[in-house]
Amino acid sequence: MGNINFKDIQPEKIRLDKLSLPDDLKKLNFAQCDELCKQIRELLIETVSNNGGHLSSNLGTVELTVAIHRVFDSPNDKIVFDVGHQAYTHKILTGRLNKFDSLRKKGGISGFCKPCESVHDPVVTGHSSTAVSSAYGIASAMKIMGSKNYAVAVVGDGALTGGITYEGMNNAGKSDVNLVVILNINEMSISKNVGSMAKYLSTLRYKDSYIKTKDVVENVLNSTPVLGKPIKNALISSKNLFKNMVLNCTLFEDMGFEYVGPINGHDIKELEAGLKAAKNKHRPVVVTVYTVKGKGYGPAEENPGEYHGIGSFEIETGNPDVVADDSFSTVFGKELVHLGKMDKRICAITAAMKYGTGLQYFAKVFPERFYDVGIAEEHAVTFCSGLSVLGMVPVFAVYSTFLQRSIDQIIHDLSIGGVHAVIGVDRAGIVGDDGETHNGIFDIPLLTSVPGIKIYSPSTYGEVKVCLNSAVYRDHGVSVIRYPRGCDKTEIPGFRVVSTYKYSGKNNDLLVVSYGRLINNVLKAKDILMRENKDFDTLKLINVYPVADIVRNIIGEYDKVLFFEESFFEGSISQKIMSEFPNVKAYAIHGFIKQQTVEEAFEEVGFLPEQIAQKIRENIDGDKT
């Protein structure tokens, strides 16, 4: 609507697609803002129902995001969303409305914040608990440059279960930079928040009495002649005692932050007042805001965990398209329950991903042996070491992308001590729509650098069960079972279920090696080439590392070996084998993979059956020329 005078426009006449955003936001009145938020919610529900994505968190932060953009001046002020999965409204308000239907699609906009998309995204986000550190770094740089602008970190309460948040706050609180940390308390991370911090934060919801009492007392004393100010100064000097009596909220202030809140996160007027108060302090401030996850969409409000990250669904019924019971995660979780019934030593650990990793089944049957440690993968691994040294068998289920955070603990707290622990690496390989920050292509290169580790990569449900049993009962030290997102029941004909390898036998001059779900595309490529009277032998690795001597012997029997691997190449299994055998040619992943479907990503890296067949065809035909 550009230069239009908004004062006389009725709220129902405001149209999201007609505004010049984010500039026009500051021209709207509160009623017009409420109408705008309604339209944003409708767009969020419509888009996520088609594209999949993070629904609950975004529905809960609509008013908050609008208020932030009205009070602060992006991109001069830098807004950092922790994880970034709740930044859809931010994207809509910062020039990406016309592209919003491409959310999480190939060539479209990401489901997370990316500077290459917009100047309004100062840093790449995708993992939890990093916003305070990033924002503090930005605020410090601003101070060095003489800028008076602000850095704003929008942090969910789930991020406070991650230790790096406290590292950032402990450091930032000692400074005098323009930093505002907005703590969005919705009592729900991916799985319901756990631990003492969650309990502490939940008490704040009912403790706005301190804020109101403080304001009333200060106003009265300021207007009282003679004795008012001395009494006020005396109260200020004893404010910590006063706060402990009324609110018991000194954590943030003990770290050096000013404190504002709590604020109703769905009241734009109240939000703006609180954010302006924080802005006027010109030093590190924490603002607590309370929101309802899934706000405005009944199914998401009733079950925010299910609608945290979701595939496409029917808006009317709320029914997801994907059947979650048919997945590697579910098979892993149910097999762990089976083992847990026979062995009381088995414990299950997750880092705020109970439902995503299939551990809800174990949690229901064995609550006394189930531990959700919050968004704290580093702690989870070291916690496993403590369980193990007294004879427990800890099984830690974690997404591949989040396991990256705990490599030091795997080396220091598990490997060096020879501790027995099992790690279920979920979402291994390409995951698709969430893009670079969530693809699980680095676990193999990272884990194979750890001495004594054993890595399985099953491609079928039956193999998942066999590998888990082997990891729990046959192995020593650290055993890893990595499996992809989604479902796959394909059993390779003619092979029995084992945990080491599957080999078709020496019948041809060319051997093709692979592991995990990619072997299924290799076999489809074999079918394509068989119709052309072109054949090759196959070797499927299940226990992929360390590479067994018998596998080395098989590879050594061939003049030419092709290795297809759904992993980053540097540090991969194929690279290790190539360094030992000059007859091996590797096809792996080079670089990051942006958001797109798994099928599109496979096409990009050349892993579709037809593409694999073409690579094999070129090698077969090349030998004949």
Image (cartoon, helix red, strand yellow):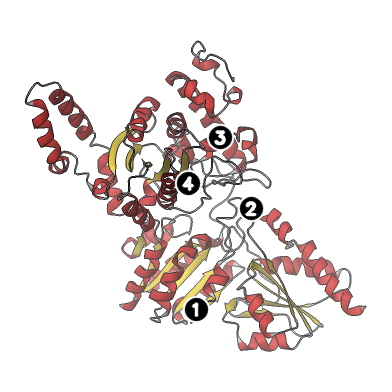
Residue type marked 4: Glu
Q: Nearer the viewer, mark 4 or mark 1?
A: 1
Q: Residue at x 53, y 43 (%)?
A: 121
What is the count of numbered marks? 4
Residue at mark 3 = 94
Q: Nearer the viewer, mark 3 or mark 4?
A: 3
> Crowdedness of circle 1 by 10 Å Cα count: few (<14), some, many (20+)?
many
List x then y, in percent, for residue 277. Answer: 32, 31
CA distance for labels 2 and 4: 25 Å
Residue at mark 2 = 594
> Crowdedness of circle 3 by 10 Å Cα count: few (<14), some, many (20+)?
many
- Mark 1 lies on a secondary structure that is loop
Residue at mark 4 = 306
List x then y, in percent, for residue 322. Answer: 58, 49
Q: Quadrant of residue 508?
A: bottom right
Residue at mark 1 = 453
| Vertical position of residue 69 compared to residue 545: above or below | above
Q: Is residue 495 visible?
A: no
